Amino acid sequence: MAEVYPVPSSKTSGRSGPGIRGGAHGAGMTRYLRRVETGGESVWIPLISFTLLSGFPEVMHAVSTRRGGMSRGPFSSLNLGDHVGDDPEDVRNNLLRFRGAAGFSELFLLHQVHGDRVAVAERDGPCPDADAVITREPGLGLLIRQADCASVLLFDPETKAVANIHSGWRGLVRNIVGSTVYAMKQVFGCRPEHLLAVQTPSLGPCCAEYKDHRHRFPSRWQRYMREAAHFDFWELIEHQLMESGIREQRMASAHICTRCRRELFYSYRAQPITGRFGAVIGLSHGL
């Protein structure tokens, strides 16, 4: 059983500010609570959704926070990462809570390796080494786990296909965004101009400092440097989406910095020993 209870949202305070509403291109986000029954008890799980996707009943999506789980210490409390040193049983229960709150019957997990491989998800399929995943399987939630890297959610209302992209700087160097859009075209016949794209909270230009950027990043990325060695990956992702053929008016970006909002999200930059929050997208049951 799940029950939704809206939570009033604060107003945005700019590109790197702490607001929970707002973003690029008129983006809106809603923060709400969903009650789930788990282990004989009733638990409220805070979730975040994007207005751009919420108007389509055939797609489900949600972004978790670090609240509402069982983990303790630096992983407190809804840690979804099973590779960070947390108690495996707590992580398993946290994943069940998030899955139930988000409305999915099954989560498809990746072993994220900061590459550019795109997997095609099938029910009961293995956990592949990949950083993006696509599917048309109803009820299957595509999960990306984060602690400063962005997740980019894609939905095609025409072909009823979805994707989730782990968009860290290493994947962006390899243009994993473009690779995923290409995979959706090849596998499902998607047309990029039909796609909707949303970008979750992640490390903002206020905190994305890379002093060794000349050795890490392509020289063309200098256009995204805002102050000394600080980079705007939010804008970089938006540009990669547009270069892939997605229209600007069909994109939304959270523009919420995870390091600045570390009381709400996990941030590796703020605390190297930490958990992972998650973003999930999938098709509704019965399609």
Image: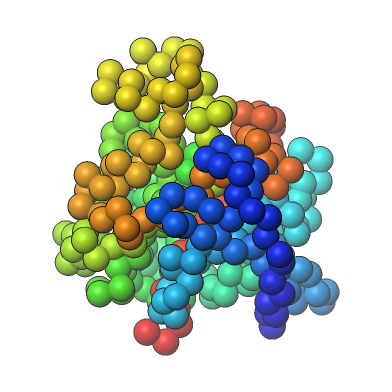
Q: Is residue 95 visible?
A: no
Q: Is residue 71 visible?
A: yes
User: Residue 187 appears in which quarter of the rendering?
Assistant: bottom left
The outermost residue toward the bottom is 286
- For image coordinates 65% across by 36% down, the residue present is 260
- For image coordinates 54% across by 53% down, the residue present is 22
Count of marks, rendered view: 0
**Where does the N terminus fall, quadrant-wise?**
bottom right
13 vs 50, left or right, is right
- For image coordinates 59% across by 64% down, the residue present is 30
Note whether 217 is above or below 252 in the view shown. above
Q: How is the image coloured?
A: rainbow
Closer to us: 103 or 117? 103
**Where does the C terminus fall, quadrant-wise?**
bottom left
Residue 157, x across and y down, in percent: 30, 73
User: Residue 226 appears in which quarter of the rendering?
Assistant: top left
Closer to us: 106 or 235? 235
Residue 39, x across and y down, in percent: 78, 72
Note whether 97 is above or below 15 in the view shown. below
Residue 95, x across and y down, in percent: 63, 60
8 vs 199, left or right, is right
Residue 227, x across and y down, in percent: 47, 19
